[in-house]
Image (cartoon, helix red, strand yellow):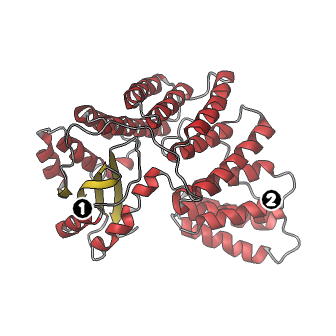
Amino acid sequence: MLGTLGCITARSRLPRAGDTETADALARAKVLFDKGDFDGAIKVANDALAGALDRSDVSRKTIASLTELVAHSAFEGGHPDAPTQFAAALSAWEKVPNSDEDVARVAGLNGLALVLMDVDLAGAEKQYRRSSAILERLHGVSDPALIMSLHYILDLLDQECRVTEFQGVLAHLEKIYDLHPGQDCAAFYRLRFHALAARRQGDAARAQILMGQAIAALEKTETDTHQSQAGLKRAAYELLGNIARDRGQYADAMRAAELGSAIIIDARDSEIYDSDYSLGLHFNYEAANDARLQSNDAKFHVRSARTGAPLFELPLPAIESCQPEIGPEPQGWVFRAGATRELIAHCFETETSPNAHVSVMMRVGSGLIVAAEAAGHNVDPAGLECASHAVLALPMPGPHDFNFVRDDWWYPKQ
């Protein structure tokens, strides 16, 4: 689901207060939300709701606004009940007359929460499609929020390898872009989504070319949303590097990782460089047999443990076209890779270092994890050794359009 935000500015996701007596509480909660005090915002909004629900003089719109703010705060604060809270907010807005646009907004947010927190791709797709249908009915094809919703749908279809449906939604999106050629980042998104389609169909070489063109198009895009564009560019380099690595082009993957790691979104973002991008560079330097591996690891105190077959062997199996998942609850390949989290959790139960970061690079072969390396900062080496062994032989059903999987965790859990 990554790489779909940025460049697009949707309508405000937080509604305005309607009733005078609860406007102050909603305003105070929003101030706390804007400051990043999500628990504080939840408390203020819930307290206001507790007093409002039994009062006949409080409008349904105000109750819906407060309920949505609780949900949004839960989502931004990482609360696992965020999807449930958004469902409550959606139900509240459905009771408000002439609130289709609000319903569309909350349905989209509910879809995002379902993806990121419940891994409910089917439920998320239902919400995204509902949101996009409402927005297109209300505003035609000119609404940026509609474009964003279609991006989310495409990412879901990509996760599940539903290539035919993906191409149908992409064709609809391209018609919208044709009607609005000045839409921010349109050229980038066109090329990115065509790259994803090529990758899923087994043409990794074309996917790599298209992603390179997508990045070049993004470089030419003039936009005021610098932070969003920087985030898009960094995610694009990550995807380009992943495609190159899957083809065994380790030097190209390393160059993409270096270019991506040099992009700093803002001053605060630079703080994560030590933990995130130095681990990415660790794997890329190792794969490319680059002499900077030792200096990178020494500078950022990277430790690692490896098990199984050689991790970065050559030649790699040819990239195949993927197959749609069979079953009532599709998970998507990224989330299947996330199953490793449950397998390695016991390895770090006693981890006490603050913000310990663990990254595991895994190679897939014949439908299983055949090689794994765990690397991290401020992590007990025994835990890394445990983690690398724990993921070995994890099933990764195929055929695949990838040869490597990487996943990251922070311990203790935040």
Q: Nearer the viewer, residue 270 or 394?
A: 394
Q: Position of residue 196 (x, y in %)?
A: 48, 35
Can you say which quadrant of the picture contains the C terminus? bottom left
Q: Position of residue 253 (x, y in %)?
A: 28, 36
Note whether 401 is above or below 94 in the view shown: above
Q: Which residue is mark 1?
A: 388
Q: Amino acid at mark 2?
A: Glu
Q: CA distance from mark 1 to mark 2?
A: 48 Å
Q: Is residue 82 left or right of residue 89?
A: left
Q: Residues within 10 Å of mark 1 (few under 14, many from 20)?
A: many
Q: Position of residue 40 (x, y in %)?
A: 57, 69
At 78% across and 59% down in the image, what residue appears? 93
Q: Nearer the viewer, residue 368 or 257?
A: 368
Q: Which mark is residue 94?
A: 2
* Element type at mark 1: helix
Residue 221 in view = yes
Q: Position of residue 46 (x, y in %)?
A: 67, 73
At 50% across and 34% down in the image, what residue appears? 197
* Element type at mark 2: helix
Q: Which mark is residue 257?
A: none
Contact check, label 1 and label 2, Cβ < 8 Å: no
